[in-house]
Every structure is written in C-alpha cells, then in structure tokens.
Image: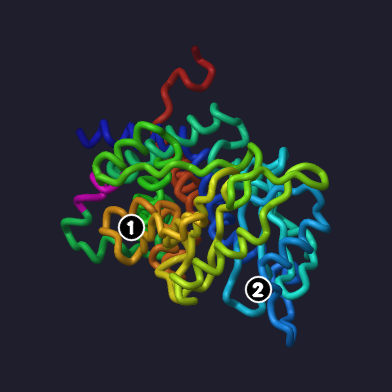
Amino acid sequence: MGKIFHTLHLYLGLAAALVLSVVGISGALLSYEKEILRLINQDSYSVTPTQDGKLPMAVLIERFLNQKEGAKILRITLSQDSHASAQIAVASKEHRKGENIFVNPYTGEILPDVRGEEFFHAVEDLHRRLMLHQVGKQIVGASVLILLFLLASGVYLYMPKIKRGFMGAFKFNPKAKGRSFLYGIHAALGMWVLPLYLLASLSGLYWSYEWYNKALHAISGVEKPQRPGAGGGMQKSASGSEQKGRGGVVNDAHAIEKAFEDFDHHAKNLYSETTLLVPQNGVKYAFFYLDRNPQHPYARNRFELDLKTGEVLKHERYEEKELSSKLMSSMLALHTGVFFGAIGQALMFLASLLMPLFGITGLLLYMKKNAKRPRSPLSDGER
C-alpha cells in the first residue's frame, strides 16, 4: 500500500505542481489586496474632515448625480471613520457588480479612480480560473482535489517518523546535504503548513464545484444565500412611483436619506461601516454593517427595512448566529486566514508563497532518485 501511495503522491504532485504554484502565488497577492490598494490610493480612500461635518445624505447624492448624470445607484458604503471616503456603486455595463466610485462625504466631490483594481481582478481570475474561463476553473478545482490527496498521502508516508516522535516530525537538519536536505524541507515544512493548506483547500472548493457548495450547505443546515441583483429595471421612489429626469432614471435621494436615518436609529451608531443595497424597485432597503470591533472584515450583520411602513423586516447579527452559520457566512475569511485575525492572514500568506517550494523539492527528489538508479546495459546506445 505504501508503494502505491508513494507512486501516486509523486506523479500526481508533479502533474499539479505548476497549477498549484500559480494558485499559491496569486493567492498570496490577493491576501493583502485591500491593504495594498489603500496604501497606493490614499487620495481615494482618505479625506480631510471639515468643520461643517459630513453632508446630509440627500445633498451628497444630489451632488454626486450632478457629476454623474443619469447614473443609477446600486450601493452606498459609509464609514464611521471621519477620515474615510464614502463609496457609491453605480450600474455599469463593464462591471457586473457595478462601478465603485469614491466620494468625499464632506463636499460631494468625486475622488480619483482607484489604481491597481484591474491588476487584482486579473490576479483573481488567474487564481480561480487560470484566465481560461470554465476550463481553467475545472483545472484549478481538480488540482485542489489533488492537493487534498497529497496532504493525506504525505501524512501517511511520513507516519513512521511521526510515530517515532511527533515534535521531531516538524524538524529537519539544515546541515544535511543532497536528498536528505530536500526531503527534510519537503516533509517537515509540509507538516507546518498542512493545516493551512487543508483549510484553504476545503474552503476554496466552495467556489470550484456547485455540488460541493450545496453539500456544505446541506450538511451545515444553513440556507444558501441568494445573490442580490446588480441592478436593472426602473428605479422607484418610496411611494412606488417611477421617477424620470435628466438622462433617464433618477435615484430617490430623500428615500435613501430616510433609510439611513431609520437604520441609524436601530443600529444606535454602534457600527464601523455599513453598506446599503439600494432597491431597484419596491421599498425594501437592505443594510450590511460591521460592528465597532468585528471578528473579521466579513463578519457582517444584515438589517432590512420597509421604508413605506417603517417595519424592520430582518435584523441578523453575526455574533448571535450559530457556529455553523458563522462558518458558512465566513467562507472567504476562512480561505484567506483573516477569520483568525492578522496572524492567521499572515500565516496563510506565507503558506501560499511556499506552495512552489513543494513542487520544486518534489521534482528534485524525483530527479535525484532516478539519477541513483543503475543504468541498463542497453541505455548507452547498444540497442
């Protein structure tokens, strides 16, 4: 059995090494996407507060629409940080989720476009689909399944050393040479990153295969959330009447302002950031907000309001969810490691960067093993 596992571990590892290396390096880049974008786009993310304070929401929207005539607002994101800009997403043919525009909440001025977003969109496409659409998505999914087998078979093959001393299985001799040195890195370092690769693989498959996605929801008993539409259709005001004006549809600024006022009343200002999904018809306004000190950047609460009646339709708080619901709503946080804070994010970043090392050491071990095999008498041209 050991020989079979060794052979499969070797050849499947070599077959998937390149894809897993690309996925690992691109994943490492995506780990700090938000931090990098903020760092290189201070003029978009940061503003200088004024003595007059932030503009009323209706005024902010009016000034925004004067600069973006005919735009249809999909989402509005506000932060309690006095130095943070507001973000308004509008419908766009080029962007499925809408075009995100940064706005100064004190003046209504549209801030410079964020640099680097297209680069990270390309990196994400490389990470998830190798830039090969559905074919690439299937290749990545299959490679992740292979990685799971490599993790399991690697532990099985390394079990004799683990039994001799569990802590010793995590050590290797840096003074060793040749094949012993390569094996030490490949096996001992593999033990360190194994939990991280296992977490990244099991969470990553959530986006690779629909059957896996459905199975997780079925096992956890958590209903799969419906993705909100990005837009389309005629915008209606709180009274349900269509509003037409310059360039087509006009957003109901006063209805949006009233929705934020009602939300603030119920949330009691105890949040750090909130995003409003502006309804494309009807009067149901949905807010997704973060607490003052959220467990992670994706630990969002959901608040739904019927603006016409003032009725709160739903108020789901992340901290009040059962563990299974928390995990299912935090799949991306688990995948990137931020579920466990800054340390978890850093460890996942390092593990992702190390992914090519296992392919390289595995290939070198294979080459050195073959080099030691005695040559056949017919291998020198005597055939």
166 or 131: nearer the viewer: 131
> x, y percentage for residue 242?
67, 43
Q: Residue furthest left?
A: 163
User: Is 293 on the left-hand or right-hand side of 164?
Assistant: right
Is 159 inside the magenta-drawn segment? yes
Q: Residue at point 23% right, 45% down?
A: 156
Q: Quadrant of residue 213?
A: top left
> x, y percentage for residue 135?
54, 27
**Dot 2 surroundings within 10 Å: few (below 14), some, or many (20 or more)?**
many
For numbered disc 1, what is the local secondary structure?
helix
Q: Is residue 297 above or below residue 268?
A: above
Q: Provide the major secondary structure of the magenta segment.
A: helix
Q: Residue at point 40% right, 42% down?
A: 206
Is 221 inside the magenta-drawn segment? no
**Dot 1 surroundings within 10 Å: few (below 14), some, or many (20 or more)?**
some
Range shown magenta = 154-160
Mark closer to the chain start, 2 or 1: 2
| Three-letter residue code for mark 2 | Ala
The answer to whether residue 117 is seen in the rendering is yes
> x, y percentage for residue 80?
57, 76
For numbered disc 2, what is the local secondary structure?
loop
The answer to whether residue 337 is seen in the rendering is no
95 or 269: nearer the viewer: 269
> x, y percentage for residue 46?
70, 73
Q: Is residue 55 above or below residue 330?
A: below
From the image, tell me which residue sits under label 1: 326
Q: Residue at point 43% right, 44% down?
A: 362
Q: Residue at point 53% right, 58% down?
A: 31
Q: Which mark is residue 21?
A: none
Q: Residue furthest top?
A: 383
Q: Which mark is residue 84?
A: 2
| Three-letter residue code for mark 1 | Lys
